[in-house]
Image: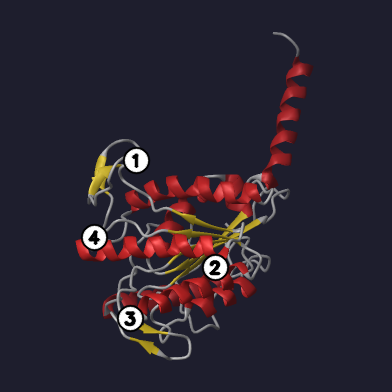
Amino acid sequence: MPVREIGVSSAADYPIHNPAPGTAGHAAPARPTPSRCVTRIVATIACCLAAAMLPRDLHAGADPAPKDKGQKLVSRIAFAGDSIVDNYWEGVLRVVSASPCLKGSVELGRFARNGTGLTRGDKLFWPREVRRIGETFRPDLFVLSVGLNDRQFIVDGNGARTAWGSPNWTDKYRDLIDEFLANAVASNARVLLIGLPIVRDGAENADLQGKNQMFADAVARLGSPHVQYIAPWRLKHEGADAFASYGPDRNGRTVQIRTSDGEHFTVAGEDLVAGYLYPKIVAAFEQMGVRLDRSCAGTEQAADAVADKAADNKGPQ
């Protein structure tokens, strides 16, 4: 899969971009322990030494170019927001990696930042950061989700504070959502704003569902055909949804689908959510007149034609 270095010179310290397909996902990035830090340092040094010995036509950290020279990068998708976006990125990455065509033609940008949101502009001001991502990564599509950490006081991009529970908190938060979406669409990218999933804690869940309504209202208020609110994945397709740590995986087996924190998804859960989100990503590209697998279409058609001709020449047996 195409790989680019991102966030290297930015204040946003993003995780590794597009790891090798098949790498196990992590629902929520954990704070590394000293022993893990040492391991990572050793691994980093080893990777740098290995990169120095790569052929010149491969850049460090990149997968080899697709063998099919007819393939080329046609679509960039930026996943940006708080830690729940890492779940979405991991799941969709496995979908893309499973297809030789998509793997060589779709680039997934990983821009998730643990512990951030629209309230902590002192840590990362997302309305400004999403514009920077649009200008540098230049995605065709943004997949966005924020709000998991926003049940607290607000610090905006200028350092102004709004106390949690104050009369103007909701209005201030609405303004931040509007600015966030406006800056995302400023790069001419399509935008999918994903609602927050149901969580275990009742009070937190009520807050997140309230934010989902604000997200949907903000999209309607913006009135752009390029911005769409996507309701969150649900375990139950009908009736009231309910949090469950365990549920059926893609094969119908009962497995753990949510992590112990009651918020994020396990690898099996990521796959379920990806099965829900990926068709919506495909639909967004179709609205742009783009097929995600278009770079392979010509090659596949040519291969079929060759096979048909060979069969005709061979004649009846």
Mark 2 in CB contact with mark 1 (< 8 angstroms)? no
Task: Tell me if residue 201 can be seen.
Answer: no
What's the mark number on residue 61? 2
Mark 2 crowdedness (10 Å alpha carbons): few <14, some 14-19, many ≥20: many
Task: Tell me if residue 213 can be seen.
Answer: yes
Q: Where residue 262 appears, x then y in whole percent?
A: 23, 60
Between tags 4 and 3, which lies in front?
Answer: 3
Task: Tell me the residue that label 3 is attached to.
Answer: 167
Q: What residue type is labelled 1?
A: His
- Decide which of 231, 24 is in the foreground and name it: 231
The residue shown at (31%, 45%) is 235
- Marks 4/1: CA distance? 20 Å
Q: Sequence order check: which comes first, mark 2 or mark 1?
A: 2
Task: Tell me the residue that label 1 is attached to.
Answer: 237
Q: Where residue 316 appears, x then y in whole percent?
A: 72, 9
> Quadrant location of the N terminus?
bottom right
- Marks 4/3: CA distance? 30 Å
> Quadrant location of the C terminus?
top right
Q: Which amino acid does label 2 sit on?
A: Gly
Q: What residue type is labelled 3?
A: Pro
- Decide which of 184, 47 is in the foreground and name it: 184
- Marks 2/1: CA distance? 40 Å
Mark 4 in CB contact with mark 2 (< 8 angstroms)? no
Which of the 4 image quadrants contains residue 266?
bottom left
